Amino acid sequence: MKEIEVFVDNERIDIYLAKSLNISRSKVQKLIKNKKILINGKNATNNYLVSTGDIINVDDDLDFDIHIKAEDIPVDIIYENDDLLVINKPSGMVVHPAPGNYEGTLVNALLGKYNLSSNNLRPGIVHRLDKDTSGVMLVAKNDEIHDILSRMISEKKVKRTYLALVSGVIINDSGTIDAPIGRDPKNREKMMVTDINSKHAITHFKVLKRLKKHTLIECILDTGRTHQIRVHMAYIGYPIFNDYVYGKEKIDEEFGQMLHSWKIEFHNPRDNELLKFEVKAPKRFDEIIRSIENEENI
């Protein structure tokens, strides 16, 4: 029995499993027909649209196990105890393996050094950062803490603060964006604000510094939807600078969007000690801001 937790929305189950398990859609459909696939404990149908959080169980004789290999890749560890890690993820690193990309990820790097919680292709990962988003992340070393940290995040008991440079000058000193996010039906790689097959999403922002044509802000998440800050800021007309998916202004394709996981704050699940961590933005992040400031002052 293979168990898979879903991390996408509004995709047919046969298409999703064909990609996830690297098998044909016809094979998936045959398994569904023979009642070998359960979705949230019930028999699946071919036209079911999966959603984030769905649990899929596949009962088949095929060996679906994908062996994620440990790799000798440096990891910047900020804090460590018996249960968890706090790490500083570099921009450009994928967090976990996915079909077609099973090497060079943060998970590969961590497996080379630690025992992690068991979670299909995402061992240890309790929350994600986009490939080109840098900064602080939590990682679980065991299943008990994985479950606790995941629950703490869903209950808003983990405070995550991001640093972002956006295009345009935001007039208000602060604000809250409360807009549901779902997958863009015209581009499966993108998310969008929509009422169709979407999930509740809230982002709070505060202005830190105004430039002539840009604004440096901090963002705090109440929810953790895919591409949430990038989608929300673009939705209100202030897209993240250098975002090649949602933005308008682009300066450095190798670096990616100007979004950094800056701070994280939570209570240690074992002894309730308040833990706070802050990670400076990457050198390139600061260089881009200085470059913009110099250009706008000419």
Image: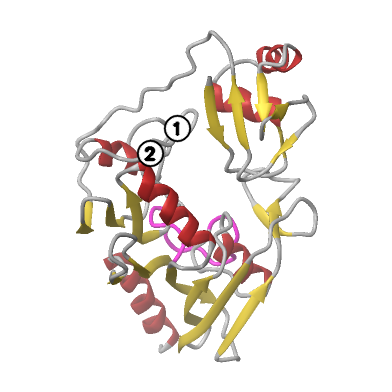
Tell me the residue at 62%/26% (across/down).
17
- Residue at image location 49% in from the left, 56% down from the top: 151
Residue 120's mark?
1
Q: As shown in the figure, which amino acid type bears the numbered disc 1?
A: Asn
Q: Whole-percent x and y of residue 164? A: 46, 72
Please name the amino acid that badge 2 sits on.
Answer: Pro
Residue 259: x and y in percent read 44, 66
Does the magenta-highlighted stretch encompass residue 256? yes
Give percent across and percent down for residue 186: 75, 46
For label 1, the SS is loop
Dividing the picture into quadrants, the one containing residue 19 is top right
Q: Can the viewer see residue 41 in this picture?
A: yes
Q: Are marks 1 and 2 in contact (CB under 8 Å)?
A: yes
The colour style of the image is secondary structure
Q: Quadrant of the C terminus?
A: bottom left
The dot on residue 199 is: none
Q: Residue at x 42, y 39 (%)?
A: 122
Tell me how far mark 1 sits from mark 2, CA to CA: 6 Å
Q: Position of residue 283 (x, y in %)?
A: 27, 67
Q: Is residue 74 left or right of residue 226?
A: left
User: What residue would you read off at disc 2?
Assistant: 123
Residue ID at (57%, 43%):
7
Q: 121 or 262: nearer the eye?
A: 121
Residue 135 versus residue 207 in the image, above or below? above
Q: Residues within 10 Å of mark 2 (few under 14, many from 20)?
A: many
**Which residue range is magenta in the image?**
244-258
